[in-house]
Image (tube, helix red, strand yellow):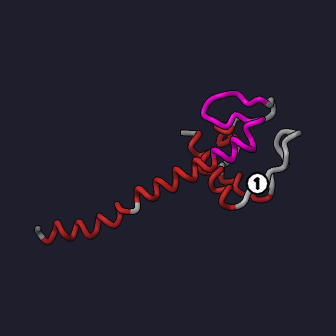
Amino acid sequence: MKRKTLLKIFIVAPMLAGTPAAWANDNLQVSHGRRIVEANCARCHAVGRTGVSSHPDAPPFRMLHLRYPIEDLEEALAEGISTGHPDMPEFVADPQQIGAIVAYIRTLDR
């Protein structure tokens, strides 16, 4: 094998090696976020790419990015969301859950 070819293999192979694992981790995080919002938010909010929220004051999650930057949700989730629709229960998430919820919500505006 030529030296240039070997050099390319040693440079490119490590970059490609982590890619499937990163995608798998992203998919796991998004799936975890979907499960969290389905368990805690779907009673009032439409949490998928389609559907209508059952509560008239609860925006569909796929529309949240139009109201405010999704990054702003991170702080609200950490402190406990106690505003929103008047009868919304307080919800506090740990950092891992926050990352998963935000990752899931980001998939909805694509």
Say above or below: 52 vs 80: above
* Disc 1 element: helix
Q: Position of residue 62 (x, y in %)?
A: 64, 37
In the image, taking residue 101 as reference, residue 83 lies left or right, namely right
Residue 67 is left or right of residue 2, and the answer is right
State the residue position of label 1.
Answer: 76
> Outermost residue toward the right?
86
- Residue 77 falls in image quadrant: bottom right
Depth order, front residue of 100/66: 100
Seen in the picture, residue 61 relative to 91 is either above or below; the reply is above
Quarter of the image with the N terminus is: bottom left
User: Residue at point 18% right, 69% down?
Assistant: 6
What residue lies at 40% left-to-right and 58% top-to-bottom?
19
For residue 99, what is the image quadrant?
bottom right
Name the amino acid, label 1.
Ala
So how many labels did they put on this image?
Answer: 1
- Dominant secondary structure (helix, strand or loop) of the stretch shown in magenta: loop
Q: Which residues make up the magenta segment?
A: 34-54
Residue 92, position in %: x, y? 78, 55
Residue drawn at (14%, 72%) of the image = 3
Residue 26 falls within the magenta-colored stretch: no
